[in-house]
Amino acid sequence: MDYDMSKREVKLDRELSELDNFVIKFIKLLKNYVIVSGYVSILLGRTRATEDVDLLVPKMEKHDFISFWRKVHDEGFWCINTSNADEAFDILNEHAIRFAKKEKPVPNIEFKVIKNDLDKFSYDNRIKVILAFENLYISPIELQIAYKLFLGSEKDIEDARHIYSLLKDKINKEELISSLETLGVFNKLGLLENGKY
Amino acid sequence: MVSIKDIKVDLEELNKFKSRNAKERLDFIDWWVNYMKNNKDKKWSEEQNVIVDSQID
């Protein structure tokens, strides 16, 4: 694995998991997106399973969403929330909608529209992950670490620790500190280094 | 059958265990990252995938 901060690229020669293949199949249906939260740490080597993959997309016009909806279903996915495209579009304005392989509830894609400055920052500053046959886009490493500390469960802290431990020599320390401060978790910095507050 | 109400739990001891367990989990993460850095992506990811895909049919 190699992370080039200046190019905003991670090169990863990993063996793809079934989860990776599930994500890749789905994101091929999208022009623009950013993957955030738990799957980022799993893609980067964290040893745990997950039932969902969080995806942010720019706000869609209804006709674009309907077109996307058809493609998703043609490719063998279903929406867990509803089978009605109009209803799904309405839900998407307020909440996430979830897509999974037909007749299966997990794993699923938690599909959300960019709604706030934090989402927008993740999207605008996304990192390209170069795999053997596909590229994926993930949220900025520094923000990802801070966000996981903000979420704060044992699992999230471990995700943060994993990414930090893996890339601490290559990330932008000032950006990390700014991200921690923005999310109000600068006091949790010690969890990354020594496991203490 | 003994009821849960009849069991005496040393909460101080249990909390120590909880803290120790959390630290050991973080220590393992550091160990795993070190393992990743010292092995090719193909090797560690093949091993990781056993866990990642364990909940997928």
Image: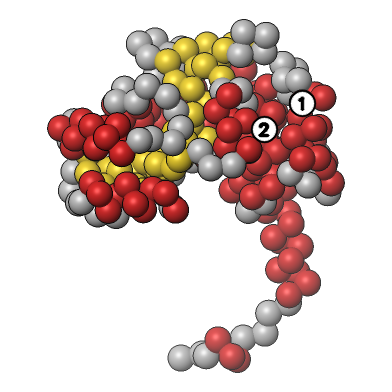
Is there CB contact under 8 Å for labels 2 and 1? yes
The total number of labels drawn is: 2
Identify which residue, A189 or A186, lies in the foreground. A186
Identify which residue, A195 or A59, lies in the foreground. A59
Chain for disc number 2: A
Identify which residue, A86 or A30, lies in the foreground. A86
Kind of residue indicated by mark 1: Glu
Gap in angstroms between the C-alphas marked 2 and 1 = 8 Å
Query: A4 left or right of A22?
Result: right
Residue A76 x/y as whole percent: 17, 35
Disc 2 element? helix
Disc 1 element? helix
Query: A27 left or right of A70?
Result: right
> Which residue is depicted at the point 80% across and 32% down?
A178
Kind of residue indicated by mark 2: Leu
Dot 1, how many residues are within 10 Å of its Cα: few (below 14), some (14-19), or many (20+)? Answer: some
Tell me, yes or no, if residue A165 can be seen here: yes
Residue B39 x/y as whole percent: 55, 15
Residue A24 x/y as whole percent: 34, 25
Q: Splitting the image into 4 quarters, where does residue A176 fall?
A: top right
Chain for disc number 1: A
Q: Which residue lies furthest to the left in this view?
A: A74
Residue A147 x/y as whole percent: 65, 41
From the image, tell me which residue sits under label 1.
A175
Quick check: A93 above or below A31?
Answer: below
> Which residue is depicted at the point 20% across and 51% down?
A84
Dot 2, how many residues are within 10 Å of its Cα: few (below 14), some (14-19), or many (20+)? Answer: many
From the image, tell me which residue sits under label 2.
A143
Query: A178 left or right of B31?
Result: right
Q: Splitting the image into 4 quarters, where does residue B13 fall?
A: bottom right
